[in-house]
Amino acid sequence: MKNPTLRERRGGSMHRRNKTVVPLGMLRRFLAASIFSIVVTSFFFVHVHVSPSPTDHKFNDKIPSFRDPQSWTRELAPPHLSKAPLSVPKLKDSRKDSDYEKLWKPPSNHGFIPCTKPTPNYSTPGRSRGYLSVHTNGGLNQMRTGICDMVAIARIINATLVIPELDKKSFWHDTSIFSDIFDEEWFISSLANDIKIIKKLPKKLVNATKIVMQFRSWSGMDYYENEIAALWDNFNVIRASKSDSRLANNNLPPEIQKLRCRACYEALRFSPHIEKMGKILVERMKSFGPYIALHLRYEKDMLAFSGCTHELSTAEAEELRIIRENTTYWKRKYINPIEERSKGFCPLTPKEVGIFLTALGYPSKTPIYIAAGEIYGGESHMTDLQSRYPLLMSKEKLASIEELEPFSSHASQMAALDYIVSVESDVFVHSYPGNMAKAVEGHRRFLGSGRTISPDRLGFFRKRKGPVSGTKGLDRFRSEETFYANPLPGCLCRTESLNINASHFSV
């Protein structure tokens, strides 16, 4: 048989190749059309976040403006973020997008706006009958709400308020004084038409006989106007040894409730250096798009105090028990963790929070700011949450060591930074209804900003809940929703243009 020539072999190869080219060409055209379709679709539905180059030290210029009436200054990114920028596509934020409506859109305020201005009949403070000295107690937010109550109490008993002393003996042993955390000059001047405030007792009264007492918890006008005001007959100085929960949540005159809100949401600003750093953190979080601030109450002190040990090792549970035993001012020593959890008294674990957010529909690319101290057990207890939501941020991740150095050894100042980022977040979620969770929820209600989610409810506008039916004595007051968690009624009024029955509000 004659061997094929080179030309014939080439011709045969080309013939066989041509048989293959036809289907491949069709496939390529099909793939090209598919890719083009995907690109076009993505153009319409995906908001692309372009990561800055390593030489670009500023965050994206298209950072949303703030709702805070005070101007907030954008700052440079910290060195470690500038050198290794995170490439994170922003979440969909079109108001026509159903996901935005469901996950990010703030609830309706039903026509309610802040109304804290006094009425025309409100008088300036009269002649002071004496001095009210205050020792605050607890963490930042417990002290904060206590100070606001003491402003109102000073008004009721016609006292000059001495700038409160902050708690330095609590679990955190924070040495901060009032002016380290709050803007002292602004606090004094902004309340000048309500009460007189001085920085220190007059020298002639420092060693004078004074009465030191704990005001009765959740007390009303009668108690302060009669029992406490009567003490001026014998003393020039009344010292309150505790500040938390000394004033009733309800059944107080409207002017007193408004004063509490003026003190809390207008007068009690953080000190300038805390405000500045807090606003920088907010800017950096917002550069990733809409974000959740998660108050993850899973620190050592919280777990030791509550006795909650679910998903902890035997060694960890024992360590917490020893801390509780050795903390003298914690009254409860023996706690059954299973009973506490069954009654709903324990915080959600980080793992449970991840499951909760996923069930609500928040995608894995959601930026989450962890508003908390050091998580007990560190990364070992954060693994599941981190796997669900890789973009977990915190003060320590957003700011450099040098930027946080002025605050890092002061727990209350660090908590103040978390407070600012939480109030300004698009969504606020907490794992336990403690003092900070209630304070942030109330502040956001007052501002009418963002969506607030509790594990058992959404933060819709509604009236403050009263006591649980059947409770008596102090338990009755404890069961009420606190004034600072929901300042309605008291500090929110409906605009005249809307006439919506308050009974129609969601619970």
Image (cartoon, rainbow, N blue to C red):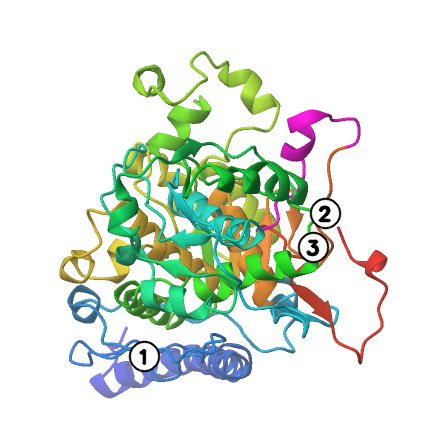
Decide: few, some or many residues near mark 3? Use Cα within 10 Å; few <14, some 14-19, many ≥20. few
Say which residue label 1 marks: 73
Decide: few, some or many residues near mark 2? Use Cα within 10 Å; few <14, some 14-19, many ≥20. few
- How far, Cα to Cα, is label 1 from label 2? 41 Å
Q: Point out the residue furthest to the front here.
A: 233
159 vs 286, nearest the viewer: 159
Say which residue label 2 marks: 251
Dividing the picture into quarters, in which one does residue 399 lie?
Answer: bottom left
Q: Nearer the viewer, mark 1 or mark 2?
A: 2
Q: Say if the magenta span includes residue 421.
A: no
- Please name the amino acid that badge 2 sits on: Asn
User: Where 467 sits versus 485, above or below?
Assistant: above
What stretch of residues is rendered in magenta? 469-484
Query: Which x, y percent locates residue 501?
Result: 86, 64
Q: Which mark is residue 440?
A: none
Q: State left or right for residue 82 relative to residue 366.
A: left
- Please name the amino acid that badge 1 sits on: Thr
